Amino acid sequence: MIRNILTAGLLITIATGCGGDKGEARSEEASEHGKEAEGHGGGEHENEAHLTPEAVERAGIRVAAAERRALTGGVAIPAEIQFDPSSTAHVGPLVPGRITKVGVALGDRVKKGQLLGAVASSDVSTARSQLEQARARLSAAESTLRRQQQLSTEGIGAQRAVVEAEAEVGQFKAEVEGLRRQLSVFGSGSAGELSLTSPIDGVVVALHGTLGETAKTDEAMFVVTDPTRVWVRGNVPELELSRVQSGSAAVVRLHAFPDLSMPGTITYIAPSLDEQTRSLPIRVTLQTPDPRLRSGLFGSIELVGGSTDERVVVVPADAVATLDGQTVVFVPADEANAFRPQPVALGRRAGGFFEVRSGIAEGAPLAVSGAFTLKSTLKSGELSEGHEH
């Protein structure tokens, strides 16, 4: 009897000890899981989306500053940068000839009156020869006039002869002056050459002709332009004509420089539509042209209307997301490739932009693209490489 009681007690003790070890193990395991959960969901990085550099690049997430711009109308039309014709000079000979000198190279900056090149022309040689002959006849006529005046004074010659001599001198003077003006217009130098000079300060943007080549009158040898003076040409579709009026504001953006926005004013509206495109040509003059502008660059003109002074802080539509019923954009966090949601209050939308009434200040950095990816990352906790959210 006593032996049975001792045996039962021993079994109870063993069972109790085993249960205690398992309980402690479960407690430690639960504690570890609790710490792991705390590390992912709490602490200083709570409510942040953390991505790898590869994931940022793959998702096309780009950070830029919130900008202030006009936001009325918002219709964008195709545009092209062109040199202002009033600041461009086409320089070529007025008579055909052979190119004997090219004094500048493509891209050279030149001053007004600077020699660009020279052309030898038979027409110029003929005109110069005629000038010398006219000068010789004028000299002879002046000598005859002086002799007739002397004879008339001495009472030997007739007054009529003096008058005739004076008329002949006047005729030859007119001939000499005409030939001199002709050579001056040609730009004649010595030995029958035409000197081609720049009529403006600018840059040589085109050069047609090499030494020994024949220069033609219907093609400019040199094109000089002032690169700081450009305009933007656009074509307004027929259905958008109500948005266009002279003096209204516009914003120009270029494909080559997507982060560049240049305010301007519509300064020219064509009197009639282009029959082929059924669009109205317009011209926009920029307030502050960027030095990177080149003729031929393509972009867009945003017909914003109103005044360029009426500008608000905007963010791209691709930067906006809805998170837990709240409108947010994502701003960079302290760590690299980390973003946190920033609540914003939005106003009007024009084209691909929203007006920001509060939440983001002008110049503040934010992710201007990839908001959906950042929202998905924030919800899932991580963005596995190659995994679609």
Image: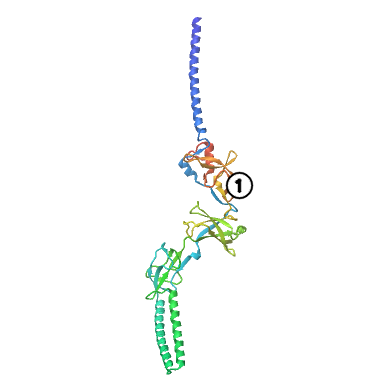
Total number of numbered discs in the rendering: 1
Give residue 250's position: percent from left, percent from top: 56, 56
**In the displayed image of the protein, which residue is found farthest to the right?**
242
Residue 140 % position (x, y): 40, 86
209 vs 329, nearest the viewer: 329
The residue at the far front in this view is 154
Residue under the point 50% across and 12% down:
12
Other-residue count near label 1 (Cα within 10 Å), few / some / many at <14 / 14–19 / ≥20: few
Q: Position of residue 245 (x, y in %)?
A: 60, 60
* Above or below, 196 relative to 300: below
Identify the residue at image location x=44%, y=80%. Answer: 177
Taking the image as drawn, is residue 329 in sight? yes
Secondary element type, mark 1: strand
Residue, far top:
1
Q: Nearer the viewer, residue 153 or 134?
A: 153
Q: In the figure, residue 106 lies in which quadrant? A: bottom left
| Image vertical order of residue 189 relative to residue 3, above or below | below
> Quick check: 132 above or below 58?
below
Above or below for 210 versus 130: above
Task: Tell me: 123 left or right of 263.
Answer: left
Q: Amino acid at mark 1?
A: Gly
Instruction: Specify the quadrant of the image occupied by residue 274.
Output: bottom right
Hey, which residue is sitting farthest bottom in the picture?
156
Name the residue tied to disc 1: 347
Residue nearest the observer in this picture, 289 or 275:
289
Residue in view at x 45 percent, y 90 percent: 162
Q: Residue at x 53, y 38 (%)?
A: 378
